[in-house]
Amino acid sequence: MYHGPTKKCGLVRGRDAAGEGGWDMSRSRFWTVMCAALVSAPLALAQDATEAALEKYRRMLKDDPWSNPGLLDADRGEELWKTKLTACDLGKGPGKVEGAFAELPRFFADADRVMDAETRILWCLEKTGFNVAAFLRSPHPAGGQPVKEVGAIATYVASKSSGMKFAAPTAHPKEKEAVALGDALFNRRAGPFDFSCTTCHASDGARIRLQGLPLLIEPAAARKVIGEWPGYRVSNAHVMTMQHRLLDCYWQMRQDRLVFGSDASVALTSYLVANAKGGEISAPSIKR
Amino acid sequence: MNRISSYLVVAGVLVAAACTLGERKMTVAPELIDAALKGGWAASTPEWLARHTQDETMRLCTQYNNEPPKAVAATIEASARASIKYPADGKLIGDWRQGERLAQSGYGMRFTDYPARNPTGGNCYACHQLSEAEVSYGTLGPSLLGYGKIKDFTAEAIKATYEKIYNSHAVLPCSNMPRLGANGVLTPEQIRDAVALLMSRDSPVNK
C-alpha cells in the first residue's frame, strides 16, 4: 500500500495522513506545486501509465481527422446557414462566417446584449419565423440523437474559424461586464453539493474518476481545451456545443437547468473565452 | 547566510504566497449576479430556486475564495458543528457493503433524477481512492486507502469520520467536500455505512 504524495503532503502540512480535506482546492494549487517538487516516483508513475493509456485513446480518436462525425453536422449546418441565415450578422457583417466565431461572444447593438455564437444564431433564426419557444423546451440532443439545428449551424460557424485564435473583443463595457459576471458565477458555490465550477476546474492535474479536469482558471490550460467546442462527444454519440457542455456541468453540480442563451450562460462563455484568448480553435473536435 | 535565516526566508515566501490568496475582488455588482441567476436557471419550482440561494456558509466561502480569515473560519466551523445530527440509536458504524455501494453511486439530485428511481449515492470514488480493487477513482480529494488502519480504528476516529462526512466544514471550513449530511444528500444511516467502509477492519479500504 502506497500513500504517496497525499500522505507526505499531509505531513508536510501538519495534517494527518488521510488529509481531512487538506487538498481543498484553493490551497491545493500551491501545495500541488510543493508536493510535486518534494515527492517523486511511484504514484506519479502509476498515474502516468493511466494518463498515457487515456492519451493513446484520445490520439486514436484524432488520428484520422476525416473520421470525425461532427463534420457531417458542420455540413448540415452549412446548408441551414445558406438557406436561412444569409442575412445574419455574426459581428463581421451580414452573411459573413469566416473568422466570426473567433471574435465571439461580443456585444451586438441591435440586440443590446452580449451574445455567443449559439445565442446569436438563435436570435437570427427568430427573425426567420423559427419557433424559439419550442426550441428552448429542448435545445439539446438526447444521447445518440444528432445535434439540433442551432447546434449544427454553430458547428459550421465554429469550423469556419478553425485554425484561428480566440480574440473576443473586450472593449465594450457590456463585454467587460460579461467576463466579470462569468468569473463571479464560475466561483459561486451553491446547490446541495456546494459546488462551483472551480470545485473541479481550479486544481491542476486532478481527475473525476479517470476523467482529467482542465484547469480552466489558467490561460495555459483554457487555451488548450476551450477551442475544441463544439466537439463530437464519442460517449454521447453526437456533437456537443458549449451551451450544452455548460448545462451538463450544472447537471453534475446538482444545480438547475441552465437556460440556453441566458445572460448567465453567455457570461460563463465570455469568461472561458477570455481565459482562452490566443488559444487555437480546433472545432469541431472529437472528444472522449 | 546561515541555515536558520534561510529557513526564515523560505517561511517568508510561503507566508507571502498564502497571503496572495484570500478575498475575492468583487468586480460585479451583486444585483447583476442576482439578475443573471434569476434568468439563468429554469428554477421551475421553489425547491429548485432554493438551490441557487446561498446559505451563510456558501456566501462566506465564495466571498473569501474558500480561504476564510480565522474569525470567519471559526464562525463557519461552529455552525457546521451545530448542524451535525447522529443516528437515533447512537451507532456510528454500519454496513461497509452498503457503504461501498453508495461510494460507487453518483445517482441522485441531478435534474434528470426526478422522480428518483434509486437511492441517492455519495459518489465518494468520484474524488477519492478508497479500495485497491476500484481503479477508476478521482483525485480531487485525498486517497483514503487504508484510512481505518491509519486511524487505528479508534472510537474517536470513527466519530470524527462520521462528522467529517456529515459536515466537512466542521473539520475544514470552506472544504470543497459536499456537506453530505447537513445538506440532506445522505441520511445518518447512509453516512454510518460510509463510515463502515472507511473504518471497518474487514472493509476493502483496509485490506
Image: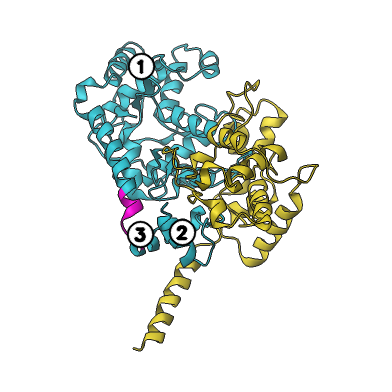
Chain colours: A cyan, B yellow
Which mark is on residue A245? none
Which mark is on residue A36? 3
Q: Residue B173 placed where, x, y %?
A: 62, 57
Residue farthest toward the right in the current orientation of the protein = B88
Q: Which residue is mark 1?
A: A85
Total labels drawn: 3
Q: Which residue is mark 2?
A: A7
Tell me which amino acid carries mark 1: Leu
Q: Which residues are magenta?
A: A39-45
- Using the numbered discs, state the Cα–Cα distance from disc 3 to disc 2 in whole angstroms: 13 Å
Chain to which mark 1 belongs: A
- Using the numbered discs, state the Cα–Cα distance from disc 3 to disc 1 in whole angstroms: 52 Å
Earlier residue among tags 3 and 1: 3
Helix, strand or loop under label 2: helix
- Quadrant for residue B41, please give it: top right
Tell me which amino acid carries mark 3: Ala
